[in-house]
Amino acid sequence: MTVVLPRTLEEALTHDGEYRAGGTDVEARRRSGLAHEVTIDLRQVPGMTGIDRSAEGTRIGAMTRVTSLAHELRDYPAIAQTAASLANPHTRAVGTVGGNLLQQTRCWYFRTGDVDCFKTGGEGCPARAGIHHFGNVFDTSSCVAPHPSSLAAAFLLYDAVAATHPGGNRRVADLYDEIDPTAEHALGRDVLTSIALPVATEGERGAYWRATARSLAEWPLVEAVCRLVVADGRIQLARVAAGGVAPVPVRLLAVEEALEGTAAEQVSLAAASSAAGEGARPAPQAAYKVRLLEGTVLEVLERALAGDGATEAAGHERPL
């Protein structure tokens, strides 16, 4: 393994290798022989860490630790609660925002390091013909594995904009390609430098929840995140997204439409959450996820409306 430590973005682009941010994904893949021989460590590149506030909104450096978002973005509750709950405390303390957004698939076929698939340059998806009960509900790609980034779903709710070098700005939603099964993102060799959020909405509510197969350090079967603005007893704004269900993080537009303008009460939430699976075409072994998605969406809506989504990790976990 060769590690290079560029001091500028321009210098980083001169190297042929794989970018490393926090390293939690790169080092795990290295053990399976799935990482590039050359690692381009971005730690010494200036201007890529920290959370900066201005009249236009909030800028988050791509090398900012995930746990910082949980503590410093409480006025963006959907993001703060997602950051406080994803993965496990150790990963949140080391992993970065950019690393979370651009990590590679958690598919166990890919992660073995000795199976050909679209992600390794092959021509098929062995999970589709094999075991895929962790697969997609919205099965729109030849690869059946869901997108792994929790933060991406949260950023969708705020129409966040990603700054890249030298490619310029693009919406976080445009970092990903729903159809192409060969790549986790659409950046190519560009470097993700920061994420921009609009000015926080005063008094908004938010919540995040994940359904897992066990209680500790588990990647979600389904996850959902929401933000609500309630005034005069009615839901004025609703934004809902989900992860673990599609090849890209997805906004649940049917749920949002069903919520906005309705009374802020249980019956409205239940009716809206039933639309979470609208348009679903699940991979056969993942059909159970449709109901799980509906229940997870109802959970986050109830938590947000009740104000129960405290900005800390779900259950027993707390950010470092």
Image: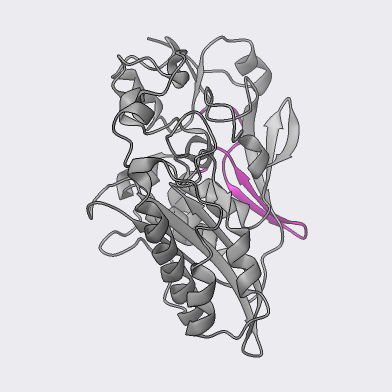
In the displayed structure image, the side of residue 44 where residue 309 appears, left or right: left
The vertical placement of 167 against 235, above or below, is above
Residue at coordinates 63% horizontally, 28% vertically from top-left? 186
Q: Is residue 239 visible?
A: no
Tell me residue 64's x, y (percent). 52, 43
* 40 or 36: nearer the viewer: 36
Residue sitting at the far bottom:
232
Q: Is residue 106 visible?
A: yes
**Magenta-tinted stretch:** 43-64
Residue at coordinates 56% horizontally, 9% vertically from top-left? 16
* 43 or 226: nearer the viewer: 226
* 214 or 255: nearer the viewer: 255
Tell me residue 219's x, y (percent). 33, 45
Residue at coordinates 68% horizontally, 32% vertically from top-left? 164
Residue at coordinates 68% horizontally, 79% vertically from top-left? 261
Tell me residue 277's x, y (percent). 50, 58
- Residue 56 forms part of the magenta stretch: yes
